[in-house]
């Protein structure tokens, strides 16, 4: 067992305590002090026992149907002993007693219906502080509580998946060893088949074999050249050549990268509550494609994905790959807007543990977050041993907006030139921005240089109603201006009042910035010496001397205030008010002076405009930003720590601290890390890929087997636990896993080995006798009929239409902002990209927005880890294949292309079969096709063409097209 | 190979294997009927061996008031808000809130309604006319201070993990009540806050995901997507016919094959859906009087009115779980009065019409209507005239089969902040919804990744106090 260190529950609680004591206090009057002393039995009888009986016994006594939290509250001993969360009370210390934090609604919320009145809570506090005097003995009906079921790790290690890999070949005689060596797979399968007296079916027809191979290896149909070569000489040698060619193709890497992406829950956006764009996720996708292309060992890939950022790198490329690989840890959907950030952090850690558990170990570790695993030998402390590693790793970093977390980013290596040009760019921008600031000041000074007279700013004006202050549009007078927010029409007014120094005529000017969204009919009243003048001002017209607009020349007297009132009655558009100026008419600018001012303003304006243009141009020609990856990092050393157990997974219900480490059941001895370096991810990565780890190589080999054979040797590919299925061929699985590790964890040689077996090449035909003894084909007496992936179906349709290119797109979501869609109720569809002429793997995967075509065809749900894609049969599949605009378009393009390239309808039908189904039609097929496109009828060519397009469209929806026989 | 009649229908197979539409029966029959085509043959379905309660309702219409309507301005009357307007809240606010602890009176008057005297504010005058048929749970509480979490809670029972939606669970448990229509339909679901996750199947078989009609509070065309194509209907029919023949040919060459048979049945169902759905979805066939009742003749109520009318037609046709979403409109952090009045105007009359219509057609008695948002709003002010999120206490309204009408259950504190009496957690509401449909929430499980999952996780208690 691990060593545990004590943990004080209180230190961690304080941060999360909701001040519910304060809440309850105000609701109910002060506690009435009873006669009994808190330290007396009578206090217990009067104040405590009745409450326990009334509010707690229903779930926490010997009479309860189901005991809540394994906690009994019906005897003194039971309360002290406690339940799942530890002792319910600590006599003498109410604040440290879980019972108190529960009835205060802090750690949990008890009783659940409604909190106890504060006076009652107070009674409990007094009672415990006084020693919790409790005369109750063990109740007679209280049978001894069931002993906590301790997980028996020794027993657990005997389960097949946790046993060390065993090589059955060790015990074989040299003769039998020879036959095994020649073909391990068929030897293993045939043994069991003959044991059950089942005769496997023969090999599939050549066309079927090739189509199966091409799709399994590359996700695409075989090319015409390969088909012709194979059909010309369908022998073992040609087969091997084709296998090697396909393995070496880029398409192989693309197709197998997609398999891995299913397990990595790959997406280009967060989905969940806040669909943030994962701008850099594609780097991970490309890392996978490149890794499979060059056959990077899978153990190295696992180490990179778990701890790449911490691994040494000899070259920039290696550093790049190491960091990008760790995007694996970052891709899960997260509740980014969760305001309780500690909970969010734990949820992210949980998602990472769950993913690593299922992806590499075939274990559902998530169960152990709340309690010991009920079915597998994984105690809760193992979970928190791993949680310590990931809590010491930083995944989230900062916020993209208030309350909304964003994730950590790590800079990737780049050239010195790139860095230099970025530095230069930054300084150019800074210099331009400085000049723009100066030019703006000069412009403002120029505008002010004219004599404006006596100014009343909006800040001195009397406002009625809810004016909105703003500084948005620059060039204002004073500290800002106000506007009516284009609302509350008829309710707002603003009054500019000034006692002018002497009687006389004044030019009155009104400062505001004009714009098309302003009101056209702003009522302005000017109180002059001659009475009120009513004006209507259009704030849409621009002024020659912004922000000033001349209202006219009026007479004012010194003993009566000059008042200009602006209202928003009956206005359509924003009403804006900045300042009013009164300029004695005799001081009003001479034409010459006015011209000088105007020239100065014009010069300043021009300089400002030029600078802004330069800035725009500089920004447009910016060098590419420093490449970053969506990647984690270790927390600073002083924050790296082991994790406490969270009882029942609750954030604020903590138990003992567990040293960081791994699953104890996977090997003998202590599974904790001796003095971890950093978070412990490096140690975890090494532990996962240690040749003695019993799970990882088995899980990996099984995944590959499943993709090629249709079902895993363990059918529950993500679950090797007791609730998963047992291996149909355990010896074979172990031998394959051992060889796989010996040969350097290389995918391509494993794939080659499997597709060269007889079993892989069997027909998928039905056989009554074999089916009678093995209806589920567990012994592989025939090939499983497999589904094509949604991606393969789409890619094949594009290829048939003649539009698929080999382009490898990067940055699929570069056009998206922080959010892929606006996070509100306005419809803002994200373009699916389905119509783009690239393989599906290069299309963006936007969570919550996977195109209906792909979801209908069982594409992996990017919210989930998908080891084996579900195979559903729903009407939506036929409907979307027949009726979606995309598929209809591809069918039409395919039909048109064939129509042009072939000259007779028979040839066109043959071409349709060849292009869509990779086979020659049989006479029966031809008969049916001719019937449907109406060749025997004397229709015109256009009608036949239309029917031919319909026929191609129908083929795209068929089972034969969507499946691999 | 046997001779092929190109015009022949594909093999006629037992449709019950395709959709678990064992009428209204619950239990192993309906469920085992679905298993053969289920996605996870190895992940066995388990409804347990225990007795399930007697069903009180056959279907649910969930009126999702996305954004969070203010309970203290609709169904939870708090006179202290008026008398203490502007005074400080006499206890602490929960953490992570933008509101300030200053009480704000609501702009609407409350009145006792109907014979029951249920308090309903003047904001919802039409729903108020059905007061005697409404059951208000005033003591709701949930998890999630932000929309994303709380929306996840009300729709899927989870605030953080990807879980099947309530409708998916119910579809899984009961199947569809119509042979040719899906069991689970979402009208106008929001694209934000999880989007399809909130009506998705997660790890349940894909068939239980809702068919979405329109988006973001609007029913759009009001039709099932892809029932019609970009080519004319005759050509679609022809393609379907060719498809059936090609599939039949594939099956005859392959021998018995469950995969191919399943696909053939699905095509068969698609063809039947194409003929059955247009009638069910045909809002045009309703009378002008009905359209007026739902407010379809007025701009303000048109979209939600169409959604509600469609919901009634779907309910009538046997669809099990229908969500009608308001769109995320109820989130009045500011301008409470203007925003809530606009939303109430858009939804109140259509909802009242829906209740009346269901009653008139005899459907109300076995339909459960659930009205509510992901949370309520604070009794304290945000900005000058708004209210912030309140998952600590809010109201949900039920109506129809099995629930007490003209009745209020539970209570918040005197200001309407925290649920205080007879608290009902979101898990409890889900447990109760399942109970009313005749399902014991602890027995409705699905094995995934080695564990038996439930809608209510390890929580949930049926709220007996609201049952008739």
Image (cartoon, rainbow, N blue to C red):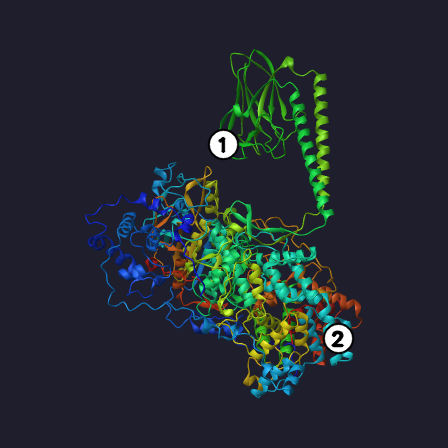
Whole-number angstrom distance, CA of label 2 to CA of label 1: 81 Å
Q: Are marks 2 and 1 in contact (CB under 8 Å)?
A: no
Name which quarter of the figure residue A299 lies in.
bottom right
Residue, disc 2: A241
Chain ID of residue with mark 2: A
Q: Is residue A613 above or below residue A129?
A: above
SS of the residue under disc 2 = helix
Chain letter behind tag 1: A
Neighbor class of circle 1 (other Cα within 10 Å; few <14, some 14-19, many 20+) is some
Q: Quadrant of the C terminus of chain A?
A: bottom right
Q: Earlier in the sequence, mark 2 or mark 1?
A: 2
The relative height of residue A293 versus residue A752 in the rendered view (above or below) is: above
The answer to which of A495 and A157 lies nearer the viewer is A157
- Which residue has dot 1 on it? A466
Left or right, residue B467 beside residue B169:
left
Instruction: For residue A799, say whether it is visible.
Output: yes
Residue A594: give x, y in percent of width and height. 70, 19
Q: Position of residue A838 (x, y in %)?
A: 70, 60
Closer to the observer: label 2 or label 1? Answer: 2
Residue A622 visible in this rendered orientation of the protein = no
């Amino acid at each position: 067992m691990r060593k545990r260190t004590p943990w004080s529950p209180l230190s961690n609680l304080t941060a999360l305590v909701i001040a519910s004591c304060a809440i309850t206090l105000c609701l109910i009057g002060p506690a009435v002090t009873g006669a009994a002393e808190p330290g007396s039995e009578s206090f217990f009888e009067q104040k405590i026992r009745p409450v326990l009986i009334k509010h707690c016994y229903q779930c926490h006594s010997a009479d309860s149907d189901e005991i809540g939290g394994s906690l009994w509250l019906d005897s003194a001993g039971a309360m002290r002993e406690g339940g799942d969360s530890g002792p319910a009370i600590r006599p003498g210390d109410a604040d440290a007693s879980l019972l108190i934090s529960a009835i205060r609604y802090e750690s949990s919320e008890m009783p659940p219906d409604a909190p106890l009145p504060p006076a009652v809570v107070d009674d409990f506090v007094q009672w415990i502080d006084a020693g919790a005097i409790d005369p109750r003995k063990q109740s007679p009906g209280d049978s001894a509580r069931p002993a906590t079921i301790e997980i028996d790790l020794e027993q657990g290690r005997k389960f097949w998946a946790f046993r060390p890999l065993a090589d059955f070949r060790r015990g074989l005689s040299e003769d039998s060893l020879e036959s095994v060596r020649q073909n391990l797979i068929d030897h293993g399968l045939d043994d069991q088949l003959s044991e059950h007296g089942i005769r496997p079916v023969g090999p599939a027809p050549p066309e079927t074999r090739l189509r199966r191979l091409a799709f399994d290896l590359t996700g695409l149909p075989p090319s015409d050249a390969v088909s012709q070569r194979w059909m010309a000489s369908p022998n073992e040698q040609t087969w091997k050549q084709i296998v090697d060619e396909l393995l070496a193709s880029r398409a192989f890497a693309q197709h197998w990268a997609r398999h891995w992406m299913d397990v990595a829950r790959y997406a280009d956006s967060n989905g969940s509550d806040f669909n943030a764009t994962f701008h850099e996720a594609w780097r991970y996708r490309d890392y996978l494609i490149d890794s499979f292309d060059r056959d990077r060992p899978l153990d190295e890939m696992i180490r990179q994905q778990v701890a790449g950022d911490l691994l040494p790198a000899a070259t920039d490329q290696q550093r790049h790959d190491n960091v990008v690989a760790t995007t694996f840890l970052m891709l899960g959907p997260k509740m980014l807007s969760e305001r309780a950030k500690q909970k969010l952090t734990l949820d992210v850690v949980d998602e990472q543990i769950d993913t690593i558990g299922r992806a590499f170990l075939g274990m559902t570790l998530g169960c152990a977050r709340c309690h010991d695993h009920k079915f597998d030998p994984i105690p809760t402390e193992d979970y928190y041993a791993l949680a310590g590693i990931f809590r010491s790793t930083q995944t989230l970093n900062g916020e993209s907006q208030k309350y909304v977390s964003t994730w950590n980013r790590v800079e990737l290596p780049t050239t010195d030139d790139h860095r230099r040009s970025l530095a230069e760019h930054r300084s150019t921008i800074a210099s331009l921005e400085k000049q723009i600031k100066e030019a703006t000041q000069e412009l403002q000074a120029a505008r002010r240089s004219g004599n404006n007279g006596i100014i009343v700013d909006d800040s001195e004006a009397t406002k009625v109603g809810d004016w909105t202050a703003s500084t948005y549009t620059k060039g204002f007078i004073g500290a800002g201006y106000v506007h009516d927010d284009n609302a509350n029409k008829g309710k707002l007014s603003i009054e500019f009042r000034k006692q002018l120094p002497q009687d006389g005529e004044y030019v009155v000017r009104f400062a505001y910035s004009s714009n098309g969204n302003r009101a056209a009919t702003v009522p302005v009243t000017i109180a002059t010496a001659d009475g009120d003048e009513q004006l209507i001002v259009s704030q849409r017209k621009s002024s020659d001397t912004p922000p000033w607009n001349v209202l006219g020349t009026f007479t004012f007297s010194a003993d009566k205030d000059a008042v200009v009132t602006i209202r928003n009655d009956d206005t359509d558009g924003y009403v804006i008010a900045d300042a009013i100026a009164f300029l004695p008419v005799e001081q009003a600018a001479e034409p010459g002076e006015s011209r000088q001012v105007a020239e100065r303003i014009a010069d300043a304006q021009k300089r400002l405009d030029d600078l802004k243009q330069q800035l725009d141009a500089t920004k447009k020609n910016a060098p590419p930003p420093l490449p970053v990856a969506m990647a984690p990092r270790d927390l600073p050393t002083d924050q790296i720590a082991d994790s406490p157990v969270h009882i029942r997974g609750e954030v604020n219900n903590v138990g003992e601290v567990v040293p960081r480490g791994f699953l104890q059941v996977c090997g003998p001895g202590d599974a904790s890390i001796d003095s971890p370096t950093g978070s412990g991810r490096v140690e975890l990565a090494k532990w996962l890929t240690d040749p003695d780890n019993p799970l990882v190589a088995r899980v990996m080999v099984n995944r590959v087997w499943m993709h090629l054979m249709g079902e895993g040797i363990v059918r529950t590919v993500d679950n090797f636990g007791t609730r998963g299925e047992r291996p149909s061929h355990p010896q074979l699985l172990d031998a394959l896993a051992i060889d796989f590790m010996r040969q350097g964890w290389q995918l391509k040689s494993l794939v080659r080995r499997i597709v060269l077996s007889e079993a892989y090449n069997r027909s998928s035909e039905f056989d009554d006798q074999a089916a009678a003894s093995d209806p589920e084909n567990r012994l592989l007496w025939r090939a499983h009929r497999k589904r094509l992936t949604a991606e393969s179906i789409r890619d094949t349709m594009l290829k048939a239409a003649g539009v698929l290119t080999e382009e490898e797109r990067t940055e699929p979501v570069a056009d998206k902002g922080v959010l892929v869609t606006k996070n509100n109720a306005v419809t803002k569809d994200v373009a699916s990209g389905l119509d783009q002429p690239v393989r599906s793997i290069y299309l963006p995967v936007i969570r919550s927005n996977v195109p209906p075509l792909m979801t209908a065809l069982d594409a992996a749900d990017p919210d989930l880890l998908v080891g084996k894609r579900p195979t559903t049969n729903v009407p939506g599949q036929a409907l979307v294949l027949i009726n979606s605009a995309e598929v209809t378009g591809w069918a039409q393009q395919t039909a048109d292309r064939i129509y042009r390239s072939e000259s007779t309808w028979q040839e066109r039908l043959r071409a349709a079969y060849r292009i869509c189904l990779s086979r020659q039609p049989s006479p029966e097929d031809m008969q049916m096709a001719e019937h449907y496109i109406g060749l025997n009828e004397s229709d015109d060519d256009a009608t036949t063409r239309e029917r031919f397009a319909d026929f191609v469209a129908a083929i795209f929806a068929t089972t034969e097209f969507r499946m691999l026989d | 190979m046997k001779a092929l009649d190109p015009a022949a229908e594909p093999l006629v197979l037992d449709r019950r294997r395709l959709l678990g539409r064992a009428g209204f029966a619950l239990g192993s029959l309906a469920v085992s009927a679905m298993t053969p085509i289920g996605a996870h043959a190895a992940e066995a379905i388990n409804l347990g061996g225990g007795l399930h309660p007697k069903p009180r309702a056959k279907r649910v219409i969930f009126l999702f008031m996305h954004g969070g309507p203010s309970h203290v301005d609709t169904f939870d009357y708090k006179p202290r808000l008026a008398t203490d307007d502007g005074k400080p809240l006499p206890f602490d606010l929960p953490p992570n809130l933008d509101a300030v602890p200053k009480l704000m009176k609501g702009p609407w008057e409350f009145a006792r309604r109907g014979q029951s005297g249920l308090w309903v504010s003047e904001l919802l005058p039409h729903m108020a006319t059905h007061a005697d048929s409404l059951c208000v749970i005033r003591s709701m509480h949930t998890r999630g201070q932000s929309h994303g979490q709380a929306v996840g809670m009300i729709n899927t029972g989870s605030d953080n993990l990807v879980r099947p939606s309530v409708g998916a669970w119910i579809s899984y448990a009961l199947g569809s009540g119509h042979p040719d229509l899906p069991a689970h339909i979402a009208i106008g679901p929001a694209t934000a806050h999880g989007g399809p996750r909130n009506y998705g199947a997660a790890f349940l078989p894909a068939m239980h995901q809702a068919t979405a009609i329109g988006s973001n509070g609007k029913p759009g065309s009001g039709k099932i997507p892809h029932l019609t194509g970009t080519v004319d209907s005759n050509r679609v029919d022809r393609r379907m016919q060719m498809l059936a023949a090609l599939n039949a040919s594939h099956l005859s060459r392959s021998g018995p094959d469950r995969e191919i048979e399943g696909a053939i049945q699905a095509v068969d169902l698609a063809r039947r859906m194409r003929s059955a759905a247009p009638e069910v979805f045909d809002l045009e066939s309703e009378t002008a009087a009905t359209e007026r009742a739902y407010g379809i003749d007025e701009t303000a109520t048109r979209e939600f009115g169409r959604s509600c009318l469609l919901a009634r037609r779907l309910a009538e046709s046997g669809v099990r779980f229908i969500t009608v979403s308001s769109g995320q409109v109820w989130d009045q952090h500011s301008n409470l009065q203007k925003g809530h009045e606009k939303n109430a105007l858009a939804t109140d009359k259509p909802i009242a019409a829906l209740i009346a219509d269901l009653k008139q057609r005899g459907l109300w008695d076995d339909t459960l209507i659930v009205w509510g948002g992901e949370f309520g709003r604070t009794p304290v002010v945000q900005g000058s005239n708004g209210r912030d999120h309140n998952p600590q206490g809010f109201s949900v309204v039920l109506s129809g089969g099995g629930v007490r009408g003209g009745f209020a259950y539970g209570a918040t504190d005197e200001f309407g902040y925290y649920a205080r009496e007879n608290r009902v957690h979101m898990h409890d509401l889900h447990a109760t919804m399942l109970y009313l449909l005749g399902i014991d929430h602890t027995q409705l499980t699905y094995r995934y990744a080695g564990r038996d999952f439930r809608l209510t996780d390890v929580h949930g208690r049926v709220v007996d106090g609201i049952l008739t």
